[in-house]
Amino acid sequence: AGDAQAAGLYVGALRASGLSSTNYQFNYIAADYTIVPASQLLVKAGSNNTVYGSAPNYSAVTAQYLYPNNVTPTNLAVNVTGSTVTVSDGVGGSAQFGLIPASGSYSGSGNLSVGSYALVANNAPGAIVITGSNFSNNLVVVGGLTVTPQVLTFAQLNISGVSKVYDGSTSMSNLAVNVAPNAFISGDRINVTVSGAFASKNVGTSLSYTVSSSFGGLDALNYVVGGGATY
């Protein structure tokens, strides 16, 4: 009983330890821990991943509720449509709300930018719909969403100009980019820069070369080139 903790959010309370290796160093990151009080709905959204520009799939959502006279929480029925979650108590009551990222960062196209976010219930006026009396207290959502970059190919960049008149250097001076219309999401603020060099400065055909690309602009981190930025 002396170890009991009050309900609330304990920031950085979970700390891993004990791993060892001769080849690796481990950097432990503390995690938060939430204790939910009785008569409060706990929704576990899990760890979710999605590619930038794609809607996440929240198929693993679960919910529990500790009724005032019970010792253990009761698992409740959950239905998820898109990002809308509906929890039913089995006796006609329900709670419906939307899952959203906390402090979400959005691109020029309005998509959630690459990064890791905690998930919360949308608490805008009218966004949480409660029926019945069981879910009258605030609900608690625990879970996260990681957005990874959209992967492009060099073919989508349409790089041309891999040739030149001899000038005594290996640098490519005629490179141009004609990005495919479907490569970047409309509205994103991004530009492409390419550079290249031949393996030899001498005149020849079928010479080896390397071409590199880089993305700039406010939404550049939402895209990468598959296999690396050089070919």
Image (cartoon, rainbow, N blue to C red):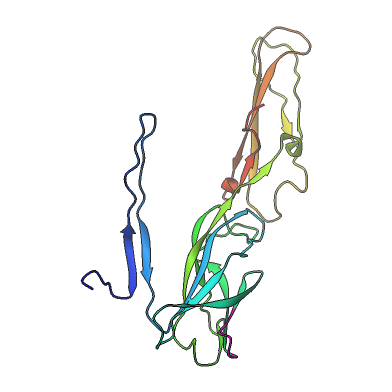
User: Magenta stretch: dominant SS?
Assistant: loop
- Is 127 located above or below residue 11 in the figure? below
Residue 142 coordinates in the image, percent (x, y): 47, 67
Identified at 71% across, 55% down, the residue is 186
Q: Quadrant of residue 96?
A: bottom right
Q: Is residue 213 found inside the magenta-colored segment of the image?
A: no
- Is 171 located above or below residue 51 in the figure? above
Residue placed furthest toward the bottom: 133
In this rendering, would 72 be left or right of 146?
left
- Is 82 located above or below residue 183 in the figure? below
Which quadrant does the N terminus fall into? bottom left
Identified at 59% across, 57% down, the residue is 107
Residue 126 coordinates in the image, percent (x, y): 56, 85
Which quadrant does the C terminus fall into? top right
Q: Which residues are magenta?
A: 87-92
Foreground residue among 173 and 29: 29
In this rendering, would 104 be left or right of 195?
left
Q: Is residue 90 found inside the magenta-colored segment of the image?
A: yes
Identified at 59% across, 64% down, the residue is 60
